[in-house]
Amino acid sequence: EVQLVESGGGLVQPGRSLRLSCAASGFTFDDYAMHWVRQAPGKGLEWVSGISWNSGSIGYADSVKGRFTISRDNAKNSLYLQMNSLRAEDTALYYCAKDIRGGFSGGSSGFDYWGQGTLVTVSS
Amino acid sequence: DIQLTQSPSFLSASVGDRVTITCRASQGISSYLAWYQQKPGKAPKLLIYAASTLQSGVPSRFSGSGSGTEFTLTISSLQPEDFATYYCQQLNSYPPLFTFGPGTKVDIK
């Protein structure tokens, strides 16, 4: 059974940092691209960042570029999101999601498994 | 960057109705589009990818079509468990960008 378990969320002051983790199990982690998607309270889905199977291709939403860094450790079956210079508008539930593909080129994609999310609240 | 719009943003329907949701892209995206269903308090669920490929385990009453800039998600006969919010999502390969549409909430009439 595929499982994605996020951790690391919490209450943080504006300008501070937080590191999210996602522990994956039930599939061959290093075969698939992975993503972070967030959802502010009462709002829609926003893709935050994605990383290919071998970390060779990485993308970020404009809203987080230069502040957030995605990474993965295939030996530990783990995905990470380092979030710096946090702002109030970063407050959201952050989901870890598995891609149906390993990379981003040459075809369509979709996120077939999702965690339950970890809540990040940025407030003074 | 490519923008996605969805219409309608809200629709009220009855069990058994045929429902169609449209997603439009600001420029052509070939068939690089997915559809998701999200229920309150739950993570999204992948329904369709590559514009028309049904994800494993998804009921056949769901179907997707389109290419280029206009796409549709159709539910052939709405069931009680289908009342939810639906999102489209596009993939741009380089640089990687996976933009979601604003969502369409399907409510009970």
Image: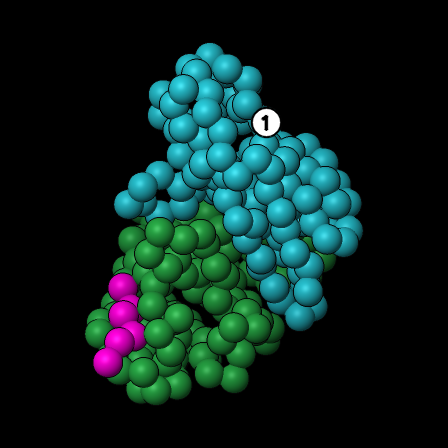
Chain colours: A green, B cyan
- Considering the image in quadrants, where does the C terminus of chain B appear? top left
Range drawn in magenta:
A119-124
Place residue B67 in its image quadrant. Answer: top right
Q: Is residue A114 above or below residue B87?
A: below
Residue underneath mark 1: B20
- From the viewer's side, name the closer residue of B97 and B83: B83
- Identify the residue at image location x=31%, y=86%: A16
Measured as percent of width and height from the top left, residue A95 is found at: 37, 59
Q: Is residue A22 above or below residue B45?
A: below
- Identify the residue at image location x=32%, y=78%: A19
- Identify the residue at image location x=31%, y=41%: B40
Measured as percent of width and height from the top left, residue B1 is found at: 68, 65
Q: Chain of mark 1?
A: B
Amino acid residing under circle 1: Thr
Residue found farthest to the top: B16
Place residue A59 in its image quadrant. Answer: bottom right
Q: Is residue A51 above or below residue B24?
A: below
Q: Is residue B102 above or below residue A119?
A: above
Measured as percent of width and height from the top left, residue B29 is found at: 73, 51
Residue B47 located within the stretch drawn in magenta:
no
* Horizontal side of residue A23 vs B2, given as left or right: left
